[in-house]
């Protein structure tokens, strides 16, 4: 063997140019490691899913004639550390060249750069060939600009890649159909049965238990239901186009006690492991829309594509533009700890109970549950962003830091002071009631601000605005709400603040 090539757990791109031809002088390596299972406490389904997809990818490479060394979590040769494992293989096989794909996580990128700098060996870095953009394209796009507005980037992406563009203008006459994507699902539109895969993972579960990896969440079945191969991911994508796309945009922000996924694609796990690319997804959706445009409104398609080429590519670019300082941002100086019910779901607030149980049971919650339920609550109760980051990074099967961190610390917690979001995404019970049926069966009254049965979100919302006035009062998008606050009677504000402070001080009682 002359060349050692590393494949990380989120680099499972079978269409990569590396794999077009076999080469007897190339050895591939993949590792399950405590380094990766332990840096935060992950959901059991996340660990299972990563291991299952990695193992299958390794077997598929071998079946195509590639040489692969794979260390399982309990293998005796496994040092449980990336660079220790690499050092062992370099020496054992007299490797002359080390090659790896560009990591999407800053932590791993730094680890590999330092490793290569410390070794007297030729090394090369390659693209993962997954994204539309390169790592620093967004930074170049916004050079000299004061604001990194996603909408500007999104429109440029549409033009550059000729996506939903006709004669230089956006199809349908608008760039953004977001106002059409805010319907409440009331059960009148039937939701097709979920596409669930039955990937057997008994051996993986046993090995995780044997290794005593600490996890959170539940895994009550013997099969893993998310796609773990490219073929399964493409099958899931086909199902989304045929069954769910027709109503995706309408209900993409909706929440309901009886529904876990609604019309969402459940593709993020497969995409974030690179089983399929953003281009795979966008092209398939566009192809289906071209064939069935009479039945599918453009607002459904634009709403989905915006999430992929707009938001997903945008947050990756922001991650690399702002790291490593971004990870320590806490502009609102929030210092509280996450309440225990984030690990149990034991709360009388029904919206939080629903979103947290969904997360614990399925390793899943869609973007509005994350942003406007759990994230909203964490921001209103002034939780330290480190606490929120660790929870989000651990609990979702699709969570990898490049996408999680900008969404959590920037969009959800406004800890960056407005680099990603133009205002804090906070709300009282009115928004939650507008987008869900959670309030209908809640212990608390959505219309009350004070009193034992008053919805905690109501007093917390006004308390947050008052307490963060120095940081937020000059924000143009917040002026209307501060105008409302300023018109309230001082006695009423004092009672609201007293109620909110009691909630913050006794969160596990609510």
Image: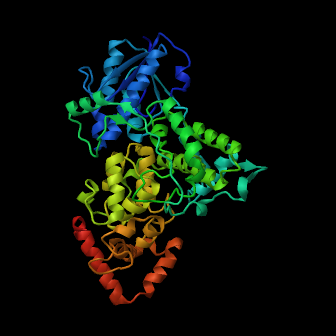
| Residue 500 rendering spot, x and y as whole percentages | 30, 75
| Residue 32 rendering spot, x and y as whole percentages | 32, 29
Q: Determine the residue located farthest toward the right in the rendered image.
A: 167
Image quadrant in which the N terminus is located: top left
Asked which colour scheme the image uses, the reply is rainbow
| Residue 412 rendering spot, x and y as whole percentages | 42, 59
- 420 in relation to 87, above or below: below
| Residue 233 rendering spot, x and y as whole percentages | 50, 35
The mark tally for this picture is: 0
Front residue (pair 127, 11): 11
Front residue (pair 406, 123): 406
Q: Residue at x 44, y 40 (%)?
A: 269
Q: Residue at x 42, y 65 (%)?
A: 437
- 359 in relation to 509, above or below: above
Q: Is residue 54 visible?
A: yes
Q: Residue at x 38, y 69 (%)?
A: 439
Front residue (pair 368, 94): 368
Question: Can you tell which quarter of the image residue 497 is in?
Answer: bottom left
Q: Is residue 415 visible?
A: no
- 327 in relation to 372, above or below: above
Image quadrant in which the C terminus is located: bottom left
Question: Can you tell which quarter of the image residue 96 is in?
Answer: top left
- 37 in relation to 164, above or below: above
């Amino acid at each position: 063997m002359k060349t050692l090539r590393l494949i990380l757990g989120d680099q499972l791109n079978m269409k990569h140019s590396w794999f077009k031809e076999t080469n007897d002088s190339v050895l591939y390596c993949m590792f399950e490691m405590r380094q990766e299972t332990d840096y935060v406490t992950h959901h059991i389904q996340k660990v299972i899913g990563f291991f299952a997809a990695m193992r299958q990818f390794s077997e598929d490479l071998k079946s195509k004639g590639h040489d692969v060394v794979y260390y399982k979590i309990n293998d005796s040769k496994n040092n449980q550390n990336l660079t220790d494992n690499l050092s062992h293989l370099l020496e054992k096989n007299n490797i002359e060249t080390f090659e790896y794909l560009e990591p999407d996580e800053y932590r791993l990128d730094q680890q590999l750069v330092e490793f290569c700098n410390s070794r007297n060996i030729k090394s090369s870095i390659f693209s993962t060939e997954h994204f539309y953009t390169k790592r620093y394209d967004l930074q170049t796009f916004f050079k000299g600009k004061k604001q990194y507005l996603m909408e500007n980037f999104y429109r440029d992406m549409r033009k550059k890649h000729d996506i939903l563009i006709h004669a230089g203008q956006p199809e349908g006459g608008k760039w953004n159909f977001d106002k059409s994507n805010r319907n409440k699902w009331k059960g009148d539109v039937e939701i097709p049965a979920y596409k669930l895969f039955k990937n057997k993972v008994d051996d993986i579960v046993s090995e995780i238990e044997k290794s005593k990896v600490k996890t959170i969440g539940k895994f009550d079945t013997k099969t893993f239901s998310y796609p773990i191969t490219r073929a399964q991911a493409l099958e899931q994508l086909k199902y989304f186009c045929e069954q769910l796309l027709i109503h995706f945009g309408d209900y993409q922000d909706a929440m309901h006690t009886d529904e876990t996924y609604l019309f969402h694609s459940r593709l993020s796990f497969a995409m974030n492991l690179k089983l399929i690319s953003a281009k795979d997804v966008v092209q398939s959706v566009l192809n289906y829309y071209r064939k069935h445009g009479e039945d599918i409104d453009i607002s459904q398609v634009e709403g989905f594509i915006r999430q992929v080429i707009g938001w997903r590519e945008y947050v990756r670019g922001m991650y690399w533009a702002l790291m490593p300082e971004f990870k320590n941002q806490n502009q609102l100086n929030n210092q509280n700890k996450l309440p225990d019910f984030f690990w149990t779901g034991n709360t009388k607030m029904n919206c939080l109970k629903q979103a947290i149980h969904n997360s614990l049971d399925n390793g899943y919650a869609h973007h509005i549950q994350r942003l406007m339920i759990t994230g909203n609550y964490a921001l209103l109760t002034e939780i330290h962003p480190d606490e929120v980051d660790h929870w989000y990074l651990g609990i979702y099967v699709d969570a990898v830091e490049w996408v999680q961190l900008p969404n959590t610390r920037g969009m959800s917690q406004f800890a960056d002071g407005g680099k990603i979001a133009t205002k804090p995404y906070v709300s009282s019970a009115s928004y939650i009631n507008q987008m869900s049926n959670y309030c209908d069966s809640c212990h608390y009254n959505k219309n009350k601000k004070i009193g034992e049965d008053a919805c905690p979100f109501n007093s917390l919302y006004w308390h947050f605005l008052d307490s963060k006035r120095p940081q937020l009062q000059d924000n143009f998008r917040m002026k209307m709400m501060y105008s409302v606050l300023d018109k309230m009677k001082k006695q009423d504000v004092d009672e609201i603040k007293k109620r909110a402070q009691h909630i913050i001080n006794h969160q596990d009682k609510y």
